Image (cartoon, rainbow, N blue to C red):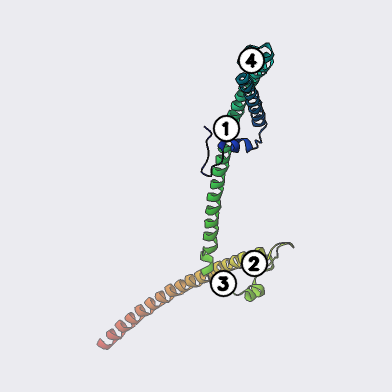
């Protein structure tokens, strides 16, 4: 019985209308068609002549049919080998794709990590940004020349700005150290003067006591 699909079309006719693309499938299809033709021809002749199968003239067709079956088995074996090879190649390609996918995930993770770190760095506020600095005009007017050198040509504006900020910070540091030394010396001088004044005050008080004692003695006499 010929099988049919839902539209009533013969499934066998559909299979015959499929055009194979792989070489071994083309060979298999052509060999199946040849076997079908030979089988149909032999059956038709056997129906007309019951002694046809034992007739010597049928030996050629039977031999050709047998050879076709042998070739069909060889082609089928070759098809299975190629199918297995295709599966292996597909599996290897899938493994390679999985490795590439994992590498891509690693790269995306690293990319996201670096982007987060960059955002942290850009949003980071260093302590130097809270340090009150002299204006750039005052810096250029008062700083020594070795702290005002420019970067060579070809540097970016951002690099120039960073370099100038480092110069201003270094100048601020030197000025603060100098002023700290001045304050330290003045405090030291203040302490020395305080000690001197205290010693003189003590001496004056001692003289006053002696003078008062002298006056009391004179009054008694």
Mark before the other along the chain sequence, 1 or 3: 1
- For disc 3, the neighbor class at 10 Å (few under 14, some 14 to 19, many from 20) is some
The residue at which mark 3 appears reads as 133
210 is higher (above) or lower (below) than 5: below
- Proximity of marks 2 and 4: CB atoms separated by less than 8 Å: no
- Proximity of marks 2 and 3: CB atoms separated by less than 8 Å: no
Mark 1, mark 4: which one is toward the viewer? 4
Numbered tag placed on residue 161 in the rendering: 2
The residue at which mark 1 appears reads as 87
Residue 150 lies in quadrant: bottom right
Mark before the other along the chain sequence, 2 or 4: 4
Residue that appears at 66% across and 73% down = 140
Mark before the other along the chain sequence, 1 or 4: 4
Residue that appears at 59% across and 26% down = 80
Circle 1 sits in a helix, a strand or a loop, which is it? Answer: helix
Q: Nearer the viewer, residue 64 or 188?
A: 64
Cα separation, mark 3 vs mark 4, equals: 117 Å
Cα separation, mark 2 vs mark 3, equals: 15 Å
Q: Nearer the viewer, residue 99 or 57?
A: 57
Mark 1, mark 2: which one is toward the viewer? 1
Q: Residue furthest left?
A: 220
The residue at which mark 4 appears reads as 52
Mark before the other along the chain sequence, 2 or 3: 3
- For disc 1, the neighbor class at 10 Å (few under 14, some 14 to 19, many from 20) is few
């Amino acid at each position: 019985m010929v099988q049919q699909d839902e539209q009533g079309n013969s499934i066998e006719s559909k299979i015959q209308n499929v055009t194979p693309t792989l070489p071994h499938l083309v060979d298999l299809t052509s060999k199946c068609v040849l076997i079908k033709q030979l089988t149909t021809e032999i059956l038709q002749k056997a129906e007309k002549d019951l002694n046809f199968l034992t007739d010597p003239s049928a030996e050629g067709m039977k031999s050709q049919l047998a050879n076709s079956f042998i070739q069909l088995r060889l082609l089928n074996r070759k098809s299975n080998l190629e199918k297995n090879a295709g599966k292996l190649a597909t599996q290897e390609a899938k493994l390679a794709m999985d490795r590439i996918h994992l590498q891509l995930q690693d790269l995306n993770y690293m990319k996201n990590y670096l982007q987060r770190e960059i955002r942290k760095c850009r949003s980071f506020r260093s302590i130097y940004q809270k340090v009150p600095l002299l204006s750039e005009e005052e810096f250029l007017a008062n700083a020594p020349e070795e702290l005002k050198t420019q970067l060579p040509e070809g540097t970016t504006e951002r690099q120039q700005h960073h370099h100038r900020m480092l110069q201003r910070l270094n100048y601020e540091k030197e000025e603060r150290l100098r002023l700290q030394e001045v304050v330290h010396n003045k405090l030291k001088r203040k302490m020395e003067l305080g000690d001197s004044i205290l010693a003189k005050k003590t001496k004056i008080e001692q003289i006053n006591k002696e003078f008062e004692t002298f006056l009391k003695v004179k009054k008694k006499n």
